[in-house]
Amino acid sequence: MSFATLNDLPAAVIEGLEAGTLAPYLGPGLLALCSGSAPPADPVALAGVLTARVSVPGKIKNRLTAAAQFIENFKHRKTLVKAMDEAFTVQALPSALHRWLAALPAPVIVDAWYDDTMRAALAAAAGDWAEVQGLSQSEHFGTWTGWYDAAGASLPDAAAPRTVLYKPWGGHAPAGNYLVSDSDFVEVLTEIDIQTPIPALVQQRRAALGFVFLGCRFNDQLPRAFARQIIKRSAGPHYAMLAEEPTRMEARFLAEQGITRIAIPLADAAAALCGAALPA
């Protein structure tokens, strides 16, 4: 099923987000709603930023994970992390949608990109929240996730805030944790079917949640693999704001996972959700 017009935006989506029974699942496309300078907002753009700093073979120049692996292998992991830190030093101002989401009683917010925008919105809202990030096994062997409070200080895994900001690919702040190279993802994907890399608290809370995908595309196996495992054993229902015609693999993924496509522009959906006029 899909909804094709703004008037078709299901009331259940707004009501579920406001009640905390639907969890936001954010992708890099959400940066398009932000004003001011913004960091790279898709894998190809990020690959371009990294390869402008470190030369890589032309055949992998636009392939993010392969380019990152080359930098890690031939220039050292520290060079890759430094390049990622530089790419995400410039941060976008949180959009009205980010701010609206930050004020919700969301048990979980999944943020599958490296920018600090959602963190900044939550910090400004000054609620009870903490962040958990995926960790690279090349830097934290045997430890899959790291917890941080609003000030960026490390927390024990037993933390149980009202809202968990879960960044499965890591993030720029507070510690420069990144899953970005081929080896980073291979390590996680080897274990993700049995859920080891997914925080226990996220697994516990998703059992009562559905997910709303905002700014996400599923035209690559990595976002599909992570989304599939993160929403595994969740209550549903699930929705995806996707105005663009889905690719064959995206359509198949949405159908397999029972995700209802809402085929309206993200900016229009955002305005409907939070009642704000957002930039196109």
Image (cartoon, helix red, strand yellow):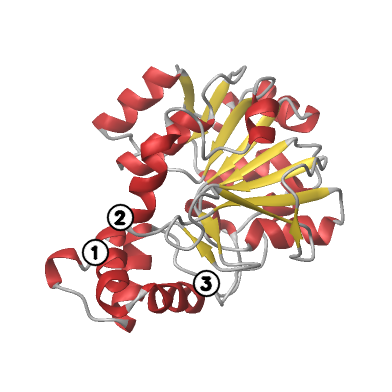
Residue at the spot of label 1: 62
First in residue order: circle 3 vs circle 2? 3
Residue 88's label in the rendered image is: 3
Q: Position of residue 193 (x, y in %)?
A: 42, 29
Q: Position of residue 61 (x, y in %)?
A: 21, 68
In this rendering, the answer to whether 273 lies above or below 229 is: below
The amino acid type found where label 3 is placed reads Phe
Along the viewing direction, whichever of 70 and 273 lies nearer the viewer: 70
Along the viewing direction, whichever of 72 and 172 lies nearer the viewer: 72
Tag 1 and tag 3, C-beta contact below 8 Å: no
Q: Residue at x 47, y 30 (%)?
A: 229
Q: Check disc 2: other Cα within 10 Å, few if <14, some if 14-19, many if 20+.
A: some
Tell me the quarter of the picture where residue 198 sits: top right
Q: Element under label 2?
A: helix
Tell me the quarter of the picture where residue 211 sits: top right
The reply to whether residue 275 is in sight is no
The amino acid type found where label 1 is placed reads Asn
Which image quarter is the C terminus in?
Answer: bottom right
First in residue order: circle 1 vs circle 2? 1
Q: Check disc 3: other Cα within 10 Å, few if <14, some if 14-19, many if 20+.
A: many
Q: Element under label 3?
A: loop
Q: Taking 156 as reference, is 4 left or right?
A: left
First in residue order: circle 1 vs circle 3? 1
Tell me the quarter of the picture where residue 279 sits: bottom right
Q: Check disc 1: other Cα within 10 Å, few if <14, some if 14-19, many if 20+.
A: many
Residue at the spot of label 2: 182
**Closer mark to the observer between disc 1 and disc 2:** 2
Tell me the CA gap for discs 3 and 2: 20 Å
